[in-house]
Amino acid sequence: MKRLMVILSITALLVGCGYNFSSQDLEKINEKQVTSEFEKELRDMKIRLDLEDIMFSSNVEDKDLEELIKDTIKYRPEYGEVRYLYNKIDLNNDGKEETIVYLIGGYVSGSGGTTVLLLDENMKLKQEFTLMNNPILISNEKTKGFKNIIVPVYGGGEEFHFAELKYDGESYPSNPSMVIEKVEDTEVSGVSIISDALTEGENGILLK
């Protein structure tokens, strides 16, 4: 079922935590016209953010990446429009960047979130996630050598909360709504990626 992709933005997360924006941060935020509805929920959960960077998705088309996406999700044009957003970030401090790809569209999304792909440093598929929402917080805390991933969980009957995905030596939990332990009353330091405020049909790169 196609849904309106009005997604939690990083601005409200930071404002809700009393984060002091730098002039560069404000320039990014104003340029993207970021909005959100979730300040109260963040305060209620007593989550304090200490972010080193706010990364908006790349706007550079990548044909090889598009082919990988189409192969992975078995895409056909008759399934409707799919858009993709991505950022590159080093998850295990080996000096090589992994790629996180966030997909938008009725074929890949549902009421509880959307499909996200994790690619290794060689742009090969490492893992596929379901029911993911943005922004995606890459924590400085690591488990078995890889940084923890924190995402908002809501929709599909879920009460709003944050889930922390921890690497088990082979993969991360693939569905954040199935992670029992919730993130609350804590400080999170790291980087926010895919920090765009998303509206269906207006964000990301069109999959061709």
Image (cartoon, rainbow, N blue to C red):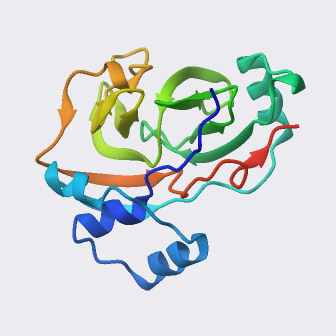
- Picture quarter with the N terminus: top right
Observer-nearest of 173 and 52: 173
Q: Is residue 74 left or right of residue 30?
A: right
Q: Position of residue 13 (x, y in %)?
A: 32, 59
Q: Which residue is drawn at 53% across and 81% down?
A: 27
Q: Is residue 4 above or below residue 192?
A: above
Observer-nearest of 41 and 14: 41
User: Disc count in the image?
Assistant: 0
Q: Position of residue 5 (x, y in %)?
A: 57, 45
* Residue 206 visible in the snapshot: yes
Q: Which residue is drawn at 88% across and 26% down?
A: 77
Determine the residue located farthest toward the bottom in the rendered image: 23
Q: Is residue 104 left or right of residue 70?
A: left
Q: In this view, does 168 lie to the left or right of 102?
A: left
Q: Is residue 101 left or right of residue 207?
A: left
Q: Where is residue 200 in the image (x, y as percent from the top left)?
A: 66, 48
Q: Residue at x 11, y 47 (%)?
A: 185
Q: Position of residue 56 (x, y in %)?
A: 57, 59
